Amino acid sequence: MTSTISPATLTVTLTEAVTLNGYDQGSSNVKTVASVTEISKRIVNVTTTEAVIATFASAIGAGNYIAADVKYMRFTNKDDTNFITLTFRNQDNDEFAVKVDAGQSICWFGDNSDGMSAVFNATQDADAASSANFGSLTNIQADADSSACDLEMFIACT
């Protein structure tokens, strides 16, 4: 069966709008991602017990994305009070955690050609955190601070 879905270009625009002392100090930056063929957009209820919200591998499946195809991700905390901790893990079991406060978002563009393959290294030794040691994203876990929060996930794949 031939698909009737044509690849499209995703356009992400980041805009800061602020005027200080009568002068515009804002900025706008645009990044496009060509040949997007898959969008996953959902809202998940994140509890105070850490749970995997997405996995990345070499095959597609329920909640599983092909790491090399993921080019852009956005996570938005829809709660008005509590924060969410997102923990990103690579195949070397390196992890980094990010606090996403109430109403805030975090965006991550994958590598232009390899998506979420070989994208990060986490270490306490800054000298050891070289690009030669970048690992591929394997999963993302979420954990709400003091009560459950809604998290909007938007993932674009080529």
Image (cartoon, rainbow, N blue to C red):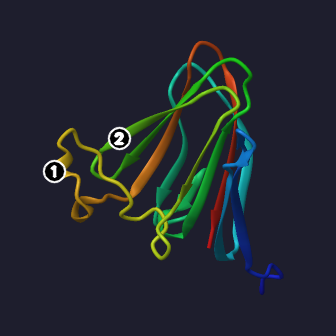
Across and down, in percent, residue 138 comes to 42, 52
Q: Residues within 10 Å of mark 1 (few under 14, many from 20)?
A: few
Q: Residues within 10 Å of mark 2 (few under 14, many from 20)?
A: some
Direction top: furthest residue: 146
- What residue do we see at 50% from left, 63% from top? 110
Report the front residue among 55 and 145: 145
Residue 157 appears in view: yes
- What residue do we see at 30% from left, 52% from top? 121
Direction front: furthest residue: 21
Q: Quadrant of residue 144?
A: top right
Q: Quadrant of residue 19?
A: top right
Q: Which residue is mark 2?
A: 95
Across and down, in percent, residue 60 comes to 57, 63
Q: Secondary structure at mark 2?
A: strand
Q: Which mark is residue 108?
A: none
Numbered circles on residues, count: 2
Residue 61 appears in view: no
- What residue do we see at 78% from left, 82% from top? 6
Q: Earlier in the sequence, mark 1 or mark 2?
A: 2
- The answer to whether the residue labelled 1 contacts the one labelled 2, judged by CB atoms less than 8 Å apart, is no
- What residue do we see at 23% from left, 43% from top? 123
In the image, residue 32 above or below residue 63: below
In the image, residue 44 above or below residue 109: above
Kind of residue at disc 2: Glu
Q: Secondary structure at mark 1?
A: helix
Kind of residue at disc 1: Asp
Across and down, in percent, residue 24 comes to 72, 50
Report the front residue among 90 and 103: 103
Quadrant location of the N terminus in the rendered image: bottom right
Q: Which mark is residue 127?
A: 1
